[in-house]
Amino acid sequence: AVVVLPGPAAAIALLSTSLFAAGGLVVVTLRTGAMAYPSEQRAMTAGIASSSFSAGVAILLPVLGRLFDAHRYNDAFLLVAAAPMLGTLIWWLLPEVKPESR
């Protein structure tokens, strides 16, 4: 289905709202994850998580661009929908490393 908006201003408003919401989700996730670490490691943890997210976007966007150029929209949306599930599965399968007692 295609959503028809009354004009460019409505499209920009919708895009801005969705980008703001997506950014908020990333920040909340980073903060929640960083709180699991001691205060002296939180900045490093947030940096690693933020860099990982950016790397994932950099890898995925060219693939999505090619899919959209080929009008393979279903495949593009399936890939975007499957990426979080794949990431969660990989995270779940990683071994838990317990910190050493000092």
Image: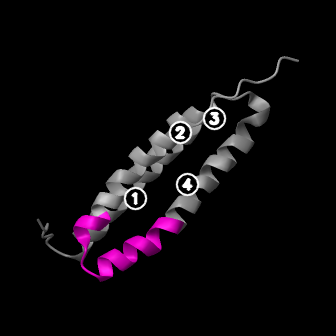
The reply to whether discs 4 and 2 touch (Cβ–Cβ < 8 Å) is no
Can you give x and y, in whole percent of width and height, for residue 95 in the image? 62, 32
Residue at point 74%, 27% (across, down) = 38
The amino acid at mark 4 is Phe
Which of discs 2 and 1 lies nearer the camera? The answer is 2
Please tell me whether mark 4 sits on a helix, a strand or a loop: helix
Q: Is residue 55 left or right of residue 69?
A: right
Which one is earlier in the sequence, the residue at label 1 or at label 3?
Answer: 1
Which one is earlier in the sequence, the residue at label 4 or at label 2?
Answer: 4
Please tell me whether mark 3 sits on a helix, a strand or a loop: helix
**Relative to residue 14, is residue 94 depicted above or below?**
above
User: Mark 1 to mark 4: distance in Å?
Assistant: 15 Å
The amino acid at mark 2 is Trp
Please tell me whether mark 1 sits on a helix, a strand or a loop: helix
State the residue in front, 75 or 18. Answer: 75
Which one is earlier in the sequence, the residue at label 2 or at label 3?
Answer: 3
User: Mark 4 to mark 2: distance in Å?
Assistant: 14 Å
Give the residue number, with chain letter if any, for mark 4: 53
Give the residue number, with chain letter if any, for mark 1: 19
Q: Alpha-carbon neighbours of circle 3 within 10 Å: few (<14), some, or many (≥20)?
A: some
User: Mark 2 to mark 3: distance in Å?
Assistant: 16 Å
Give the residue number, with chain letter if any, for mark 3: 34
Q: Alpha-carbon neighbours of circle 2 within 10 Å: few (<14), some, or many (≥20)?
A: few
Which of discs 1 and 3 lies nearer the camera? The answer is 3
Give the residue number, with chain letter if any, for mark 2: 91
State the residue in front, 68 or 50. Answer: 68
**Relative to residue 54, is residue 21 depicted above or below?**
above
Residue interval drawn in magenta: 59-76
